[in-house]
């Protein structure tokens, strides 16, 4: 099972701040990387599927980049809003899909 | 579209009891997985399946059994419940390894 590490573990920002966090993974045998958003008392929901080195995906104020050669992906949130408060997970694909422990973002009004 | 359905949503067991957590998906997905979520530990893979009749162990398989007799269903069995198995359990499915997973709503299990 491939290990995925996320940092920081938690982040507290003010409304309007931009922020980013990191997912690190072994660079060998790369298939794809998934980002998920997980709100309290709900289930994880997919944000992005990253497959190619240099990939950049965007959904509204949230974007992600991928560097498979050095083994990391960044998730960016521009102008954070309270509704962005959630845990953001990255994962390697199923079957033995390994999740990082996540970065928990809290956005204060 | 029901997606991934888990039952029950909540369950309290006594130590030593056995039970089966049900998971069903109606999307004809080949891959299905079971995870447990403990405070501060994220999602840990228990067992997974890449198709009917095929299952394999994840990171934390001890104390759990699975089977996959149909594409739709992937039940998780606790053989003899222990307090350490108190957790929230999530079932997920996906069409293939490069597609994101769809999660059920979770089962909150407490073992006394």
Image (cartoon, coloured by chain):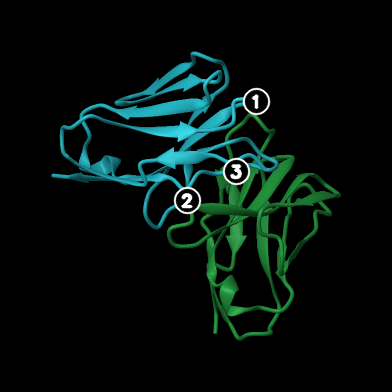
Which type of secondary structure does the marked residue at label 3 adopt?
loop
Labels 2, 1: one chain: yes
Which quadrant would the N terminus of chain A be assigned to in this image? top right
**Precedes in sequence: disc 2 or disc 1:** 1
At x 38%, y 29%, the residue is A75
**Seen in the image, is B27 located left or right of residue B50?**
left
Residue holding disc 2: A43
**Seen in the image, is A54 located left or right of residue A87?**
right
At x 39%, y 21%, the residue is A58
Q: Residue furthest top?
A: A54
Location of residue B40 in the rendering, given as x and y in whole percent from the top left corner: 43, 58
Q: Is residue A68 above or below residue A34?
A: above
Give the drawing colour for chain B: green
Q: Is residue A89 visible?
A: no
**Precedes in sequence: disc 1 or disc 3:** 1
Residue holding disc 3: A98
Circles 1, 3 touching at the beta carbon (< 8 Å): no
The Cα atoms of the two marked residues, 2 and 1, are separated by 30 Å
Which type of secondary structure does the marked residue at label 1 adopt?
loop
Subunit under mark 3: A
The chain in cyan: A
């Amino acid at each position: 099972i491939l290990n995925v590490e996320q940092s920081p573990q938690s982040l507290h920002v003010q409304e309007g701040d931009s922020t980013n966090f990191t997912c690190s993974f072994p660079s060998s045998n790369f298939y794809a990387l998934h980002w998920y958003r997980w709100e309290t008392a709900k289930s994880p929901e997919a944000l992005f599927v990253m497959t190619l080195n240099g990939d950049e995906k965007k959904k509204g104020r949230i974007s992600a980049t991928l560097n498979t050669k050095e083994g990391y992906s960044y998730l960016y949130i521009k102008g954070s809003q309270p509704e962005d408060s959630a845990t953001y997970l990255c994962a390697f694909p199923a079957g033995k899909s390994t999740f990082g422990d996540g970065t928990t973002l809290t956005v204060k009004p | 579209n029901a997606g991934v359905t888990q039952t029950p949503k909540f369950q309290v067991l006594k130590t030593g009891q056995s039970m089966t957590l049900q998971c069903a998906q109606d999307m004809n997905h080949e891959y299905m997985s079971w995870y447990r979520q403990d405070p501060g530990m994220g999602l840990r893979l228990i067992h997974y399946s890449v198709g009917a009749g095929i299952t394999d162990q994840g990171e934390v398989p001890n104390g759990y059994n699975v089977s996959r007799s149909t594409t739709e269903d992937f039940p998780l069995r606790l053989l003899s419940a222990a307090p350490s198995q108190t957790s929230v359990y999530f079932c997920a499915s996906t069409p293939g390894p490069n597609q994101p997973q769809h999660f059920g709503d979770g089962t909150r299990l407490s073992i006394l």
